Amino acid sequence: MSGGMMAQAFRLPEFYTPYPARLNPNVDSARRHTMAWAERMGMLSSRKPDGGLVWDEAALEAMDYALMCGYTHPDCDGPTLDLITDWYVWVFFFDDHFLELFKHSRDLAGARAHLDRLELFMSDDPPEPDNPAEAGLADVWARTVPSMSAAWRRRFVTSTHNLMVESMWELENIDRGRVANPIEYIQMRRRVGGAPWSANLVEYAVGAEVPDALAATRPVRVLCDTFADAVHLRNDLFSYQREVREEGENSNAVLVFERFFDLPTQEAADLVNDLLTSRLQQFENTAMTEIPALFADRRVPPHEQAAVGLYAKGLQDWQAGGHEWHIRSSRYMNEAAVLGGGPSGLVFGTARRARQYRYLPLEPVGPLPVPGLRMPYDFRVSPHLDAARADALAWARRTGFLDAGALWDERRIAGYDLAYCAAMIHADATPEGLGLAADWLTWGTYADDYYPAAFGATRDLAGARLLNERLAAFMPLHGEPVPEPLNAVERGLAELWPRTAGPLEPQARGAFRATVEDMLESWLWELANRAQHRIPDPIDYIETRRRTFGSELTMALARLTCWQAVDPALRETRVLHELETAAEDYAALVNDLYSYQKEVEFDGDLHNMVLVVQHFLDVDRWRAAQVVADLANARMAQFEHILARDLPGFLDGLDTDAHEVLTRHVGLLKDWMSGILRWHRTCTRYTETELRRARGFSFKPTGLGTTMAHPALVL
């Protein structure tokens, strides 16, 4: 268990390992099989540019990938374990081969050509292999896909593509001497690190595919994401010595935390372990609370429930076995690590879990000074603002947002000035387009206030879910009849939908409806956390915040007039995905800084990044606010970096129409961020004076479509 001649960079922390590691009895035969397979593929005779071998038999034997697969897939039969082991030998050889050929030399053009050609071997008509990486991929692909569905193949192609192609992100960061910010690192590590790919292979190993209709749902997606993050964070702790200190790589969470939080290496490693533990506990919470609710909500048949259960158990086995292998493998820093395979770190894990529930609702925190926020773009205001203000007020009256017993009155809506926000994030809109945007912002903000007021105090998740189902009925895709609205939220959506969806092509209409439904579903997530009295895991919070804040909805409004001409697949490319999520996170973090007192002291809410950071780092709110501001500024810096370094080359590969649309889209994102920051600085929604006045409102929810009685709620 040697970490090499160099002294360990830090002491390994106490790991939370709640599941026992078990070893597949077929591991010895898998060792023999995979050694012969690697030799046959040419992996043990492949040479580095300096003439040495990438691997030899002794190196492969010491790394012992058959042992890793025996621990991570303890229940599969011998032939399945052989194939799984071959996949992992291939992926680790690919990584080391790529390192020797391209990372050391920083040959970006050669790396891109190499990766483009590798993708051809995941097809029905691959070319003849030219090197061991190609030969290995061609072989394992042909042996795997015949027994899996077309849906699984699509998911597996995507995850394999990501772990290969996104290696360019690591290579470019090394070339530029750039270390990612924490949010960027976590979401990019999923693409390049391979754990989602491992999750796909778990389906093969346990003989149970995740039903395609459930694969994209939040609970199943979170199972995969938490699994992936925990695998990657654990690997970063064990591999820091080799990757950072010996090989000069900079894609490692310990290094990311060292740089971002300005911490010594040991403290950064301990913080990475805290995040690893939090992700494991998010996995447990999702498996125990969200997955059963998903089964009931979707009326999932028993055989599909069993498949998801086997998948979740397979992911647990992988976590336990992966940890055990890291302790035993010669590949990693593991001196003084504890062998044994049983559960450990349970006291540490319990203390970490308790921190998520240590929350005092309605704590009188007072106003929170907002630290400095970087904004390199000037805000612009539509010339149609005055008309939009008048129209938005009239629309709110018509829909019932200002009725007696409602949440708002005219003074509140005037102070919120949502038309001003719309006029900045849609500065070039027509009068009609600006009016529509202002009404959507008004509806979304009112509905966001309505859900916790109507369903939060009573923990009426069933009532909230029923309202979501009813709201979906007000967004027909093909002109279906809609029900009669029962409350202001339904009435507003019933009026907005035909104005919005009518001019759209069917595909765009469906995509926009999905964006609204995603936001509504994210509000159920907030209500569930409130019912559990549970402060969210930091990563789950950031990623879901993009939906609860309505970022995706308001961006979708900006895209309605131009995005239909662009291939939707472009949004899934790394450049655009990172650009948009950086903008979304900046805006959401700005909101959390300004809304802290409102949410913590007046609403009794626990969905605020300042609060999440307070409890995760165990710091006071002023230090937490500075961390949140630093994260916002880091996301802004990343946005600027993408515009300067990544976007020009990306645009050069597009046709003229797509180039023009995306150039305009970048301008809209700048307006969107600058407008949101300006609006927070000028509106009254988060001022203490308005918050204290609003406490006197008596709200009586009506027409909720549930038999539960709702008492009047004093806000």
Image (spheres, grey):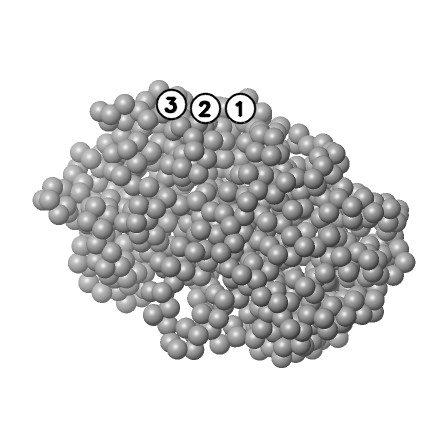
Q: CA distance from mark 1 to mark 3?
A: 16 Å
Return the residue found at the far left: 51
- 241, above or below 200, in the image: above
368 left or right, relative to 163: right
* Residue 604 visible in the current orientation: yes
- The residue tagged 3 is 11
At numbered mark 2, what does the secondary structure look like: helix, strand or loop? loop
Question: Residue drawn 30% across and 52% down?
Answer: 172
Question: Tag 1 or tag 2, which sits nearer the N-term?
Answer: 2
* Residue 307 visible in the current orientation: no
Badge 2 local density, few (<14 within 10 Å), some, or many (20+)?
A: some
- The residue tagged 2 is 14
- 31, above or below 485, in the image: above
Rendered image quadrant of residue 150 = bottom left
Q: Residue 348 got which mark?
A: 1
Q: In this view of the protein, which residue sits in the foreground, 441 or 61? A: 441
Question: Residue drawn 43% across and 33% down?
Answer: 262
- 302, above or below 338, in the image: below
Rendered image quadrant of residue 382 = bottom right
Residue 267: give x, y in percent of width and height: 44, 27
Q: Amino acid at mark 1?
A: Phe
Residues under numbered marks 2 and 1 in contact, where contact means CB atoms less than 8 Å apart? yes
Q: In this view of the protein, which residue sits in the foreground, 307 or 481? A: 481
Question: Residue drawn 22% across and 37% down?
Answer: 60
Q: CA distance from mark 2 to mark 3?
A: 9 Å
Residue 369: give x, y in percent of width and height: 63, 40
240 left or right, relative to 657: left
At numbered mark 3, what does the secondary structure look like: helix, strand or loop? loop
Question: Residue drawn 65% across and 65% down?
Answer: 422
